[in-house]
Every structure is written in C-alpha cells, then in structure tokens.
Image (cartoon, rainbow, N blue to C red):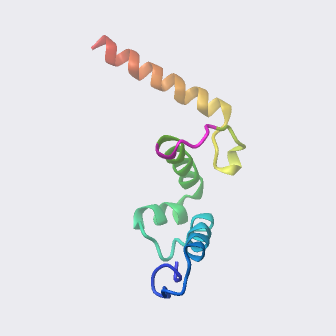
Amino acid sequence: MDTISSNWTPVFTLRAALISLQGLLASPEPKDPQDAEVASMMIRNPKEFEHVAREWAVKYAGAPITIDDEGSGGITQSEQQASAQASRDQEAEKRRM
C-alpha cells in the first residue's frame, strides 16, 4: 500500500501500481485497513471473514460459486443446502403473507 499512497512518484508505471494493488489484494494488511469493520472481522473471526468475502465476491464481482473444504473459507455442501432451503422457506413465507 505504501507504493500507492505515501511512496508514490510519477516514475512508477501503471504496471508497478497494478502489481502493488495485486499484492494488497492477495495479502491484505488488517493493521492498516481501508475498512476498520472488515479488518476487525479478519482479525477476530477469520473463518467468518473468508465466508463473507467469498459471498461478496460471488454477489458483487461475479466470482464462480464453488464448494470448497470448510477450512478454505468456502462452505460445505450441507451448509449450501441448508442455506438454499432457508431461502426457499423465506420466499414461501413471503408469498403466504
């Protein structure tokens, strides 16, 4: 992040900026956050952070929906099925009202 913020000079190329940005996205620094709430979650509950990050990537960035091992930040197949069932139940409840 230093390259993009405080150590920026006109000598840096777009390539250098993109490499710095790629490094920031690959390994975020929660002790110098852009969003304190997200950084707090990353430190306090990394599993939840991974789950929410994956969810947002799918929802807002069009990332592919995958089912990974629980330890990788993905969701298990049973969790995905339970979530899908809960969504169907909510929709059915709304229609009944």
Residue 82 to residue 34: above or below:
above
Along the line of sight, the residue nearer the viewer: 54 or 24: 24
Residue 40 to residue 68: above or below:
below
Q: Position of residue 91 (x, y in %)?
A: 39, 20
Residue at image coords 61%, 71% = 19
Residue 5 to residue 65: above or below:
below
Q: Quadrant of residue 58?
A: top right
Along the line of sight, the residue nearer the viewer: 24 or 39: 24
Q: Quadrant of residue 78?
A: top right
- Position of the C terminus by quadrant: top left
Q: Main secondary structure of the magenta part?
A: loop
Along the line of sight, the residue nearer the viewer: 53 or 6: 6
Residue 11 to residue 90: above or below:
below
Residue at image coords 46%, 72% = 33
Residue at far right of view = 69
**Which residues, given as a range, are shown in magenta?**
60-65
Residue at image coords 53%, 47% = 57
61 is within the stretch colored magenta: yes
Q: Position of residue 47 (x, y in %)?
A: 59, 53
Along the line of sight, the residue nearer the viewer: 16 or 60: 16
Residue at far top of view = 96
66 is within the stretch colored magenta: no
Q: Position of residue 75 (x, y in %)?
A: 63, 40
